[in-house]
Image (cartoon, helix red, strand yellow):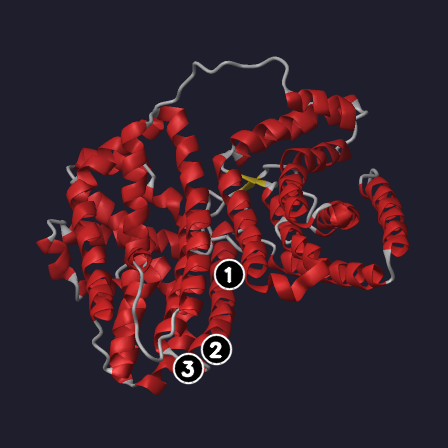
Amino acid sequence: MNNFVSLKILDKLRFLYEILGVDYDTMRLILSTKLTIDSRKTSNLLNNTQFNESSNQYKIMQIIYAIIGFFIMIIIMISKNTFISMAIYFSIFMFLMLTTFISDFSAVILDVKDKGILATRGISLKTMNASKVTHIMIYMINISLALSGFSLIASIKYGLIFSLVFLIEILIIDIFMIIISGLVYLFILNIFDGEKLRDIITIIQIGFTILFSLGYILVMNISESMNLFKNINLGVVSYFLPPFWFSAPLEIIVTRNKNESLLILSFLALVVPLVSILIYIKLTPVLEKKLQKLNNMDSSKNVKKFNLTMKFSNLVCRDKEERIFFNFVSNIIRKDRDFKTIVYTAMGSNIFGIFVIFNRHTENLNSYVYLLLYFYALSIPTIIIVLKRSRNYKASYIYKTIPIKNKMNIHKGAIKACLVNIIIPFYLIMCVIFVNFYEVYITQHIIVIFLVNIFITINTFNIIKKNMPFSHQINILKKNDAILENSLMGVLTCIMAGIHFIVSIFGTLAVNVYIIVILIVNILLFKSSFKMK
């Protein structure tokens, strides 16, 4: 239980934990227990060798991040200006690491189960929280090293000191992401209680993704507007953007330029994370106590007998059994926080991609700007795949205990619920924005992409395993579930975008014909996909 490399490295930093008032031996024991559980290949508590699958998925996730890291390494390789390239690099890196933390590890830092067991043994709140943060850190560092590995190798061209500082900054960013998230959660915990608090935390997690997306765009724009070959003179806004903080020391190492702005930014890169760590440690007991609010359930909710969803169910579902499961799934996807966090984060990332390209290449796209809406379709497979997972998966026994005439009605109601509650509403909001910018002449293309979204939805359902909705466990290490299916649907989306582009070249009549063709294909596909098997 003590043979983990991460724990041996951690032993070298024992003095830091003791200075901060943490009982290191107790924390190490907790950590070694958790890491042992994580590394098990089988478990009597879970079916189908769940941990073995988790381990494989975690390795696959690291490989994917390494591939992404190879491509963002090109920023460093072709760099003509260290400050700009590293600011862009850190923007991408921080965005990816934050979304990873939010979607996979927020539940760990907000977990209150350990306290019920460990606090009764006289273990301090500071030690318990340190074990949670360190547990997350071990996984975050592994992922960040996979993501930055190629870049660290490429950075050797600037010298070993540059590479060493670069590595230290990567580790500081990992800690900074976790600490800032924890402090934000503490602020929210001070304001809200019970069930409302859980909803607010979910909104904050999704908001983090949007905030860092906007920050990335801002960094790109500021970087383009600066003439760094002559002088570095940053505006006040730049001092509030962490990517500039961490790129400044590297610029000083390469150019020996000790510009006042660079020195201030370098100071912020060191001091702000350090101060945030000290504040977090000071407030750790408060955070652990406030987390108990998550156990407070607000039972005084007003239940509406009739709502908009039920009215929609009467319109889109002819079969009574299908209508029941449409309402059932609609109710869950509105309330399930894990589902909303994963789905809305994925959607936010893709929508972010649309606006980055929209922001930077509008003139080049000209009349084909509507093709950017295909980025939205890339998030649809995630919605359909996550639909089968839930924290309360054990309740899926209901599918076996109630009399169901046709089990395909469950799937049909679930897919329609996703379309009505998530896929179509968000697409329409994006369309309103695009029509507002580009007038009504792209309406035909909006209809085409709307039908393609439905086409992608049905085909995703066809290629994944036909598991019942919310019948499988959500595993925090299983972020990249159904990687093959996601990739196939990504390729299919690109193919559909290519066909759309070719058809649009032939004019309005060709687009109208294409609309009719896709509509017919969708109808036939929908009927064949939900037949009894």
Q: Which residue is mark 2?
A: 74
Quarter the C terminus occupies: top right
Q: Amino acid at mark 3?
A: Lys
Q: As rendered, which of 40 and 505 lies closer to the eye?
A: 505
Q: From the image, tell me which residue sits under label 3.
A: 80
Residue in view at x 25 percent, y 72 percent: 249
Say which amino acid is labelled 1: Asn
Residue 93: % across, % down: 41, 63
Secondary element at tag 1: helix
Residue 404 visible: no
Would you say 92 lies left or right of 113 here? right
Left or right of 448? Residue 224 is: left
| Image height of 265 relative to 227, above or below | above
Q: Residue at x 63, y 64 (%)?
A: 363
Q: CA distance from mark 2 to mark 3?
A: 12 Å
Quadrant occupied by the N terminus: bottom left
| Mark 3 neighbour density, 10 Å: few (under 14) some (14–19) many (20 or more) | few
Choose top left, top right, bottom left or bottom right for residue 7: bottom left
Give the residue type at disc 2. Ile
Dot label at residue 56: 1
